[in-house]
């Protein structure tokens, strides 16, 4: 979604894992999965001892969904869900969820916050910055760079632009009639966002 303000510096292993999940969700929400992503998802190995956790179970479900779906089917599913004729079945924009309108005040505030953080939308990106996938990519960048982006800065961005609506978006994705593979994406997204809320709320004040 955006270009970082500079080259990345060493980040913690935990933050890199979180950044990778955000990056994966962003890639799956912005465009149909390609061969590389599907191959990666088909190689997911979830320890049987961990499958009792909701997050581990969602990874396993995504792994199985990737194995049973073909690329052309995924392309059709993506189009029906997010593009459609006039509009897809699910509208992946923060402004829509928060106000019921596209390109509304939440987008204007997000754009200002991105400028303040030194993040710029890449020239080839056409989607507004409050697209769910774009926001996931932005959060991935905030976790991947060490340029004054403290955990508290991450939390403020998450609370202001993600926490208030993205769980509902992922819930809607799971119940959409056109969703098959993307039900699994929605389940993973829902579990991950809820874990992020818990993790960021535990930060010392």
Image (cartoon, rainbow, N blue to C red):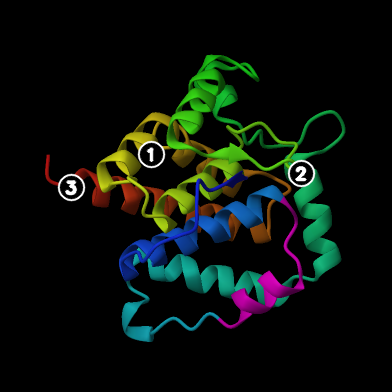
Residue ID at (50%, 46%):
5
Q: Is residue 172 visible?
A: no
Relative to 107, 13 lies left or right = left
Residue ID at (38%, 39%):
158
Whichever of labels 2 and 1 marks the residue nearer the N terminus, that label is 2
In front: label 2 or label 3: 2
* Residue 42 place in picture, x, y as percent: 62, 79
Q: CA distance from mark 2 to mark 1?
A: 25 Å
Residue ID at (55%, 29%):
94
The kind of secondary structure the magenta stretch mainly shows is helix
Whichever of labels 2 and 3 marks the residue nearer the N terminus, that label is 2
* Quadrant housing residue 43: bottom right
32 is within the stretch colored magenta: yes
Instruction: From the image, tell me which residue sits under label 3.
Output: 203
Instruction: From the image, tell me which residue sits under label 2.
Output: 124
Task: Give the residues drawn in magenta, as a range.
Answer: 31-43
In front: label 2 or label 1: 2
Which of 4/71 is in front?
A: 4
Q: CA distance from mark 2 to mark 3?
A: 36 Å
Q: Which part of the image, by quadrant, shows the N terminus?
A: top right
Instruction: From the image, tell me which residue sits under label 1.
Output: 158
Could you classify mark 3 by the number of other residues whose Cα lies within 10 Å: few (under 14), some (14-19), or many (20 or more)? few
């Amino acid at each position: 979604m955006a270009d970082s303000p500079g080259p990345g510096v060493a980040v913690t292993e935990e933050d890199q894992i979180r950044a990778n999940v955000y990056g994966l969700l962003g890639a799956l929400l912005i465009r149909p999965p390609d061969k590389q992503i599907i191959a990666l998802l088909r190689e997911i190995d979830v320890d049987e001892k961990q499958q009792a956790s909701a997050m581990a179970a969602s990874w396993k479900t995504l792994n199985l969904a990737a194995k049973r779906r073909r690329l052309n089917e995924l392309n059709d599913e993506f189009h029906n869900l997010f593009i459609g004729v006039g509009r897809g079945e699910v509208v992946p924009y923060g402004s829509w969820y928060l106000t019921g309108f596209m390109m509304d005040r939440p987008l204007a505030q997000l754009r200002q916050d991105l400028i303040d953080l030194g993040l710029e939308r890449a020239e080839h990106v056409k989607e507004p910055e409050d697209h769910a996938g774009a926001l996931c990519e932005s959060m991935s960048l905030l976790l991947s760079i060490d340029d004054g982006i403290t955990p508290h800065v991450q939390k403020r961005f998450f609370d202001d632009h993600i926490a208030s609506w993205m769980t509902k978006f992922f819930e809607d994705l799971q119940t959409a009639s056109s969703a098959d593979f993307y039900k699994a994406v929605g389940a993973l997204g829902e579990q991950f966002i809820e874990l992020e809320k818990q993790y960021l709320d535990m930060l010392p004040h």
